Image (spheres, coloured by chain):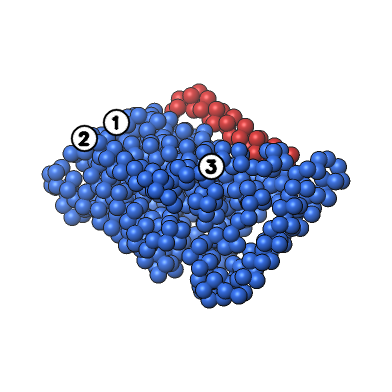
Amino acid sequence: MTQPSKFRTTLIRVLIVQIVTIALLGLLQAIYTV
Amino acid sequence: MGVINWAIVVAYVGYVIVDGIRKSKDTDTVSGYFVANRSLPWWVVGLSVMATQLSAVTMIGTTGQGATDGLRFVQTYLGLPIAMVILGVTLVPLLHGSGVYTAYEYLERRFDAKTRSLTAFLFLLSRGMSCGTIVAAPAVVFSAIFGLPVVWSVALIGVPTVIYTMLGGVQAVAWADVKQMVLIIVALVAVMVVLVVRMPIGPDDALRIAGSTGRLRAFDFSFDLSDTYTFWTGMIGGTFLMLSYFGTDQSQVQRFLTAKSVEQARSSLLMSAYWKIPLQALVLLVGVGVFLYYQFVRPPLLFNPAQEAVVVAEKGDQYAALEERYGRAFSAREAAARSAADAHGGPTEAAALDAFRAREADVQTIRGEALDLAGEVTGQATDDVNYIIPRFVLGELPIGLAGLFIAGVIAAAMSSIAAELNALATASVIDFYRRWVRPEASDAHYLRISKGATAFWGIFACVVATYAATLGSLIEVVNQFGSFFYGSILGVFLLAMMPRARAAGAFFGLIAGMTTVGFVAFRTDVAYLWQNLIGAAVVFAVGTVLSVLGRGEAGA
């Protein structure tokens, strides 16, 4: 991960998981919060 | 609680002690005792990191918060994944690669002995006291729920933890954490399944009702420095809190120092990066589920049974009148909830949800009056929220599952306490005893002292926990003081990564950072998550300026 490309891959993976989690919780909020 | 439930709890506690000790290998050296000879695989370390962070407060307090306040607490963890990636390329290789036992030991190599001693002392001061509160939180709840004296519930949680931590060292702690984490997740999922199965309405209707009360509002995108629960506070302030906690707090640093290699240490932190937010969402959703369940089954007016007994004894008539009003308000709310569940689409649904919200407000008004009455009678601020889940578990879950959940709460408490005791003993022995008292002694001598230090901190934590109610304000002051230097210590480590930074800059920068955060905490209403960023930034700025000036003088 100290190599720039490996670090970038890890960062992108973590960000994707983060975005998906936020999107799912956001969707729950958007659909059901009046 | 029933014989079967107690049997599960006792079997679990016995198993943890026996297995914790059985799993401890090579603990006849200081390196084996404190860092497992850097031999543990990433998944063991990863689960240990998660178990250390997840305390009994998460199991009973955060689930309770989900029931009363919904999902918004999840925002606090938004910075965690980013922090883990940053740590993976900064402090993890620095600390693991340098072969230290404590994070503070590294600061002497990089700066000087006084910076090391000050940071280690601050860690011992705040963590020593907070370890007592980690024992006290579940012990006080168990004491009220089971009618046990506090000292017995402290012993139930504290004694087995001290035994396996003292005898087995970090290996026992890490391997116990693995089982404890599994038990915690199984318990949470089991409760969630029971809630879904027993809910008298469908999931979509249930979510509409929860949503109408704002409990599914996970994110607030407003930018308000004084609000802890916003997207930006969690994402930016939270990143700095997590950098400080996972990167500079010995109770977490010691977890990744046990990993086989730097690469495995990074992978262990990434486990939290991927799973912490979903896990936290599950914890809060369990709370939301309990809130929904209690729309159809009448909950107690006061969840804390000990407080309820005092109120009944001293203001019985007033409480009975409240109970009567509460019964009527509950029936009206239940009817409104069923109508809302049946109404689908258009103005009918909107009107039904409005009616439900009005009935929910009526119920909350009466609950508020009962809580005020309890506060008035007992003279203490009510912590009723911590009793919502335990009362639900013991009153509503089938036999066996209640025992499983209580064992899960004990597991969560033990895993956090064990890591703290282990880290407190390490900092005491490595940063003080070996550094200042006996620099030259045999490994066997240090090992004996280490086991003694673990026992000392365990007893200290149990004593603090037993007198937590009396020591309440003192513990609060120490915890608040602890938050002053959390970000500031991160600032010192940031300086450590700058080749030009000098010892004087780090030491006086640390003092400047703590003073600034103290001022911000007392004189402004900036949310605590931002204090970590402020502390780190001030230390870094002051430290850099002093280092540059110092170089100028040295050169002159």
* Image-quadrant location for residue B228: bottom right
Residue type highlighted by circle 2: Asp
Residue type highlighted by circle 1: Ser
Q: Is residue B289 left or right of residue B304?
A: right
The subunit letter for the residue under badge 2 reads B
In the figure, B138 relative to B82: above or below?
Answer: below
Percent position (x, y) of residue B509? Answer: 42, 55
Judged by depth in the image, the label closer to the viewer, 3 or 1, is: 3
Chain letter corresponding to the colour blue: B
* Residue at image mark 1: B39
Helix, strand or loop at label 1? It is loop
Label disc, if present, on residue B26 of the rendered structure? 2
Whether labels 2 and 1 share one chain: yes
Tell me which numbered mark, 2 or 1, is placed earlier along the sequence.
Answer: 2
Tell me which numbered mark, 3 or 1, is placed earlier along the sequence.
Answer: 1
In the figure, B479 relative to B447: above or below?
Answer: below
Label disc, if present, on residue B191 of the rendered structure? 3
Residue type highlighted by circle 3: Val
